[in-house]
């Protein structure tokens, strides 16, 4: 009995202990039940009060993989249909003529000289009659943009019509460029832009005289300008928006004008004479006719007065093949030297001058390049100029934020970047800068002599 009792007491104790454990578990379960209940209630309530979340548009669409042929075809077809629809939404020639007729019919007197004007009331009347395609142009915002100093509160009909034409042209061009956007991501790769320009050549009368054998060199010449200035990080692609925003496409399409003046052709990088000039220079420099330029061959570029130190940096930093430069790399070089006022050109030259790759030019780097100028001056029998004087003059011109360092942005902000870079890399450029006052005085004397005659 005592043993059974002890056993019973032991069992009862265990039971009591187990009961305490169970109570803790029950509390936990109850807590979890309450949490679940209130969480579900909160979640359900949130769902009910935020139904508008369903209207948020999807902002990410996964591109089909290369092996998903059907999805790729579907995407291409969808883009083609979309671009066709956008093209149909644009005003055609007949609709533009009708718009001009309506504007002319509703002009508001009096005329300013020979320029027809229209007030806001008649502007809205034309908008109602012009049709749904024109609705986007007949807004108060557009009218206010074109309203200047007219005392009657009118705008020029010609200015408004040119505004509409420009908008239509931009949309047409964007659609045309988008057809070459193989990736469908709003940018063109180098090969895409090459295809666009190659197919554009037959539509440009100013290029009728080009030999077909020269087409590939012309396309390369034209494409390099777009990529040199619009792809500074060298990603290999350019946004279509950037192409439309710059003036390069206007210059290219200017070649549609059959009566383009000789002066305009000479200053237009995309003209046949300009492209032939650049390619002809390349051929003349290529003395061994291997289609590439060595450092020695490139040294004859321009006035043949660039320093060896600078040319060494060109071949160290730029893409070469067995130590020689191809035509595409040469084009970058030419674009940089012919456009030294432009930020992209200064970025190209700055990278060459930044020998320590620190992101700035200090006294050491300036001295490194100017010593080569001093050596050339000695060779040509000129009295060497003190580096200290040149250094002080450079810092005075640039006025950098840090008095001991010149950054790329300092060069750009100073508007003296072309002068500074010329002083450091080209003896002829330095001599011209040093003797600028004498040259100006000489030019004035010559002008005076011409006036007397």
Image (cartoon, rainbow, N blue to C red):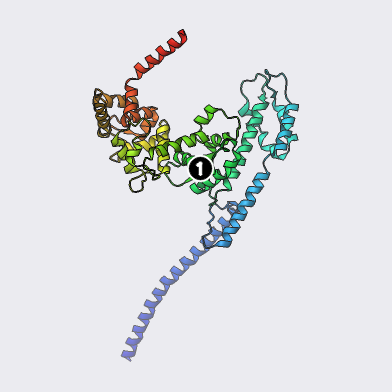
Percent across and percent down for residue 35 are 48, 63
Q: Is residue 185 left or right of residue 348?
A: right
Q: Is residue 344 visible?
A: no
Residue 180 at x, y percent in the picture: 56, 48
Observer able to see residue 394 = yes
**Residue 8 image position (x, y, % from top left):** 36, 86
In the picture, which quadrant includes the N terminus?
bottom left
Residue placed at 23% from the left, 24% from the top?
A: 386
Q: Note whether 183 is above or below 433 in the view shown.
A: below
Position above or below: 219 against 421? below
Quick one: which residue is furthest to the front in this view? 288
Secondary structure beneath label 1: helix
Which residue lies at the image location 54% right of the left edge and 51% below the top edge? 182
Q: Nearer the viewer, residue 203 or 25?
A: 203
> Residue 104 at what x, y percent from top left?
73, 27
| Image-quadrant location for residue 300 | top left
The residue under the point 25% across, 31% down is: 371
Q: Nearer the viewer, residue 290 or 226?
A: 290
Judging depth in this view, the residue of 161 and 124 nearest the camera is: 161
In the image, what residue occupies the spot 31% across and 28% down?
427
Whether residue 96 sits left or right of residue 20 in the image: it is right
Indicate whether 84 appears above or below 364. Answer: below
- Badge 1 is on which residue? 214
Which sits in the foreground, 352 or 413? 352
């Amino acid at each position: 009995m005592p043993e059974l009792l002890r056993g019973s007491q032991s069992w009862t104790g265990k039971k009591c202990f187990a009961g305490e454990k169970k109570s803790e578990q029950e509390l936990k379960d109850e807590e979890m039940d309450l949490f679940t209940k209130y969480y579900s209630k909160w979640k359900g309530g949130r769902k009910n009060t935020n139904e508008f979340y369903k209207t948020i548009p999807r902002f990410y669409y996964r591109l089909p993989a290369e092996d998903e042929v059907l999805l790729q075809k579907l995407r291409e077809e969808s883009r083609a249909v979309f671009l066709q629809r956008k093209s149909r939404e644009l005003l055609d020639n007949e609709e533009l003529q009708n718009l001009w007729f309506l504007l002319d019919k509703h002009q508001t007197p009096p005329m300013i000289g020979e320029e027809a004007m229209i007030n806001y009331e008649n502007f809205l009347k034309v908008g109602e009659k012009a049709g749904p395609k024109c609705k986007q142009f007949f807004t108060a915002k557009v009218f206010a943009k074109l309203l200047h100093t007219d005392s009657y509160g009118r705008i020029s009909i010609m200015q408004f019509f040119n505004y509409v034409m420009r908008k239509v042209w931009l949309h047409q061009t964007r659609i045309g460029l988008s057809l070459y956007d193989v990736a469908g991501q709003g940018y063109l790769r180098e090969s895409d832009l090459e295809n666009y320009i190659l197919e554009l050549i037959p539509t440009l009368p100013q290029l009728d005289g080009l030999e077909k054998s020269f087409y590939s060199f012309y396309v390369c010449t034209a494409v390099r300008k777009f990529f040199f200035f619009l792809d500074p990080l060298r990603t290999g692609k350019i946004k279509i928006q950037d192409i439309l925003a710059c003036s390069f496409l206007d210059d290219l399409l200017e070649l549609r004008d059959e009566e383009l003046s000789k002066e305009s052709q000479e200053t237009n990088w995309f003209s046949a004479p300009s492209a032939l000039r650049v390619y002809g220079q390349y051929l003349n420099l290529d003395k061994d006719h291997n289609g590439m330029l060595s450092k020695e061959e490139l040294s004859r570029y321009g006035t043949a007065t660039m320093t060896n130190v600078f040319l060494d940096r060109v071949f160290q930093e730029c893409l070469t093949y067995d130590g020689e430069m191809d035509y595409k790399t040469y084009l970058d070089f030419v674009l940089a030297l012919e456009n030294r006022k432009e930020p992209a050109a200064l970025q190209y030259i700055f990278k060459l001058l930044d020998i320590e790759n620190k992101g700035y030019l200090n006294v050491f780097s300036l001295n490194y390049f100017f010593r080569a100028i001093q050596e050339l001056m000695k060779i040509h029998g000129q009295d060497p100029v003190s580096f200290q004087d040149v250094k002080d003059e450079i810092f005075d011109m640039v006025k950098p934020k840090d008095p001991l360092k010149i950054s790329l942005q300092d060069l750009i902000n100073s508007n003296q970047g072309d002068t500074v870079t010329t002083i450091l890399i080209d003896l002829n450029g330095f001599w011209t800068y040093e003797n600028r006052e004498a040259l100006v005085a000489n030019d004035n004397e010559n002008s005076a002599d011409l006036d007397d005659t």
